[in-house]
Image (tube, rainbow, N blue to C red):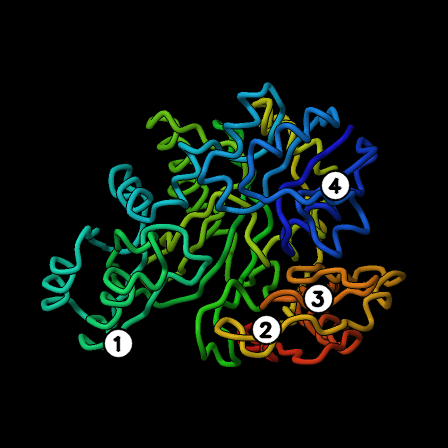
Amino acid sequence: MKVLIIGSGGREHAIATCVAKSKRVSKIYAAPGNAGIAALAECVDISVMDFEKQVAFAKEKAIDFVIVGPDDPLVAGCVDAFEAAGMKVFGPRKNAAIIEGSKAFSKDLMKKYDIPTAAYENFDNADDALAYLETADFPIVLKADGLALGKGVLICNTLEEARAGVKEIMLDKHFGDAGNRMVIEEFMTGREVSVLAFCDGTTIKTMTSAQDHKRAKDGDQGLNTGGMGTFSPSPFYTDEIDAFCQEEIYKKTMAAMKAEGRDFVGVLFTGLMITEKGTKVLEFNARFGDPEAQVVLPRLKNDIMDVLEACVEGTLDQVNLEFEDNAAVCVVLASDGYPVAYEKGYPIKGLDTFDDKEGYYVFHAGTALKDGEVVTNGGRVLGVTAKGEDLVTARANAYEATKWIDFDNKYMRNDIGKAIDER
């Protein structure tokens, strides 16, 4: 089987690592891939948004199966383009990826089908939003409706902050067209948990839980990022909470999307908040989380191609999804200054240390090859992941492994998974 992976980040490197273990796969291509993926796949210089070139390449190489990783191409209809060409492709179609592409859509869907989430209102213009804030309780959350690289969410503690937030999102267009519409949502407190699930349009099967760290600095300070690290499983996601979520969230969401004529095939990412008043949905994403994929996929026991193919063929109910009875922690090595301004092009040393280390992984997110050398090429550069018999061990292993890597401008949070020790 020949497989094409669309994407260039840590998520796609984690997917490629999993696909490379499949005995069914003879060749992997990646468009465009990165310096790490290049060790597993043949990388081709095709943009994630150039569907015409992707399809032409897949036809030329007689690709058997396509995996679309990132949110932008999914929301824009990448899967539809491959399906129109008669190709087997994993991921939600455009009309289903809207569950991530529009926060207003997902909130309205949850309200209509009685799926627990925070109270909210949607706004199409700044004046109405500002008027609403005059009577709102604080703190409050402002969300750009569209895709904003995980950064279009502002938590405002005062009316003054919220007014400035409306200006930033809707008037100054800090997040571009993503801010043409905005959701204002009640602020929830509790434990955040991420649960990814494989879906075939009818059946939904959840993977092991995880928890992300979005803020740039220790102690959850600083700006929101695409994710500074994660751990799996979450000790706060109990069997009781899982039982509730299976019935009241996951199955209801699948049924709701089907009822709307938007059958969801792919990975549904559910961001949860475990509050004193019960577990509620923070957000939905239409793909593997990043860096969540970097701690969840290394623990998958199944041949991933069996699972992905079952999703596409509508036979997921016949798959017994299994994960290792252990834990994993990922620490993101970033460029200092991320997510605002940072320098690129620094050589990375120590990558080969991982070659013979069982249970240790280094996933490339923002790297490039320059004159035969791997250099930094983004804000989030690498995801260093380690497994262990439990979360405490996995965390210690991951932080030890971060010492094996060195590059100028290297930055990381030092408290990924600290909540493990506090539970």
Which circle, 2 or 4, is nearer the viewer? 4
Q: Which residue is mark 3?
A: 384
Check disc 3 and give the amino acid type: Val
Residue at the farthest front position? 371
Corner quadrant of residue 415:
bottom right
Q: What kind of element bears circle 2? A: loop
Check disc 1 and give the amino acid type: Asn
Q: Which residue is mark 2?
A: 416
Q: What kind of element bears circle 4? A: helix
Q: CA distance from mark 3 to mark 1?
A: 34 Å
Q: Residue at x 42, y 63 (%)?
A: 151
Check disc 2 and give the amino acid type: Ile
Which label belongs to residue 157? 1
Q: Is residue 188 left or right of residue 3?
A: left
CB under 8 Å between discs 3 and 4: no
Q: CA distance from mark 1 to mark 2?
A: 25 Å
Q: 375 or 393: nearer the eye?
A: 375
Check disc 4 and give the amino acid type: Val
Q: Earlier in the sequence, mark 2 or mark 4?
A: 4
Q: Which residue is mark 4?
A: 19
Q: What kind of element bears circle 1? A: loop
State which quarter of the image contains the N terminus.
top right
Q: Earlier in the sequence, mark 4 or mark 1?
A: 4
* 348 shown above or below 97: below
Q: CA distance from mark 4 to mark 1?
A: 44 Å
